[in-house]
Image (spheres, rainbow, N blue to C red):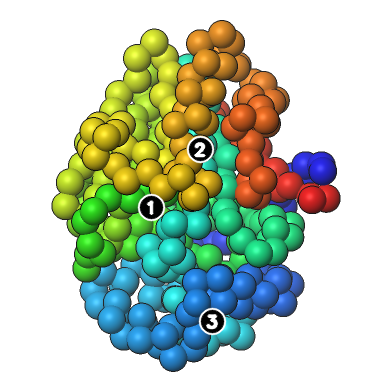
Amino acid sequence: MDFQTIPEIGIDLDAHGADRWAPLAPYREIAQGMVHFALKDAGVGTETGNLISKLLKDASLACVEEDLRGLSEVLRIPHETLLAANLYYDSLKLLWACSAFAVDTPQGPLHARNLDWVAEDLKMSEASLTLRYRGTGFEFVSVGWPGMVGVLSASAPGRFSISLNAVCSEEPFSGGLPVVFLLRRVLEEAKDFEAAVAILETEKICSDCILLVTGTEAGQFVIVERSPSRAAVIRPTDGVLIATNHYQELEAPDEQLIKPDDERERTTIDRHCRLDERLAGERPATFKQCLSLLRDPNIFMDITVQQMVFQPATGDYCAEMIRGR
């Protein structure tokens, strides 16, 4: 097994329609494969995808409607199918895990994360792609796959970074904004760390999530725990924060239904404790040190497909895919 830098492609958000997404044309076949995989993995067929599109086609999707139509044209994927694939997290978050942490350094906080995804074909890691979005007055990088218009992990230079971890509560699916589209909107609209946290804490959303948000100054990082109707914000103690796949504040741990046969839920406490143990003994100050910590055998999982580290203060980042499994 080895690690390879995820390639980066630029997207001009001041362009319109298919012109905006023209740089992804060389990735058409990869994107078609990823969309097919996502829908198959979620048990979503074309008819179901059309139904999802009809149910969610309202004002809450206006922020990505132009992207979906333009990308549909470039990738030659039906609009409704592309939308259904982009709703993968909100419809099937049980297949996600992820471990993340933020830590202070003299150059500004570092935000590190493993993205873990249960999938039949782990070669999906090799389809990873980073998009550098630029628009009037803003810029950010988003680590994902061709065909995604939403965001799972991203950093806005000089502003903040965000990563999404899966979690479950007893609350039902809501009619709010899909989480991945909310993150995209925040990266475009929020002027700074405080503005991003305020939106993420209060916006109506579809489903549960854990969001690690990191700013540019010492101690400027929080975990925003969300369900469709509730929110809790966790602030750092001793210059570090850790997020895996369980609520730390929103619900008491004994109220969560941890399933022993679910690898994500079974290991969430262990991964959190191991990160806590490692960070108590060493404080990574470089990207390399963060990646090394994330590759600890008790943190790195068989389903880890991407690793990344962001430093919003400098705008630097690294993102790697896992190969050779």
On residue 267, which mark appears? 2
N-term-proximal mark, 3 vs 1: 3
- Horizontal and vertical percent for residue 211? 37, 41
Q: CA distance from mark 3 to mark 2?
A: 38 Å
On residue 72, which mark appears? 3
Q: Is residue 153 above or below residue 205?
A: above
Residue visible at 43% across and 83% down in the picture: 49
Looking at this view, is 197 or 269 the one in front? 269
Disc 2 marks which amino acid? Thr
- Judged left or right of residue 80, residue 311 is right
For disc 3, the neighbor class at 10 Å (few under 14, some 14 to 19, many from 20) is many
Residue placed farthest to the front in the image?
260
Disc 1 marks which amino acid? Leu
Disc 3 marks which amino acid? Ser
- Judged left or right of residue 230, residue 314 is right
- Horizontal and vertical percent for residue 182? 34, 56
- Horizontal and vertical percent for residue 307? 63, 41
Element marked by disc 2: helix
Residue visible at 46% across and 72% down in the picture: 67
> For the residues carrying marks 2 and 1, which lies nearer the camera in this image?
2
Q: Is residue 185 above or below residue 276?
A: below
Element marked by disc 3: helix
Looking at this view, is 64 or 321 the one in front? 321
Label 1: which residue? 183
Image quadrant where residue 254 sits? top left
Q: Is residue 244 above or below residue 25?
A: above
For disc 1, the neighbor class at 10 Å (few under 14, some 14 to 19, many from 20) is many
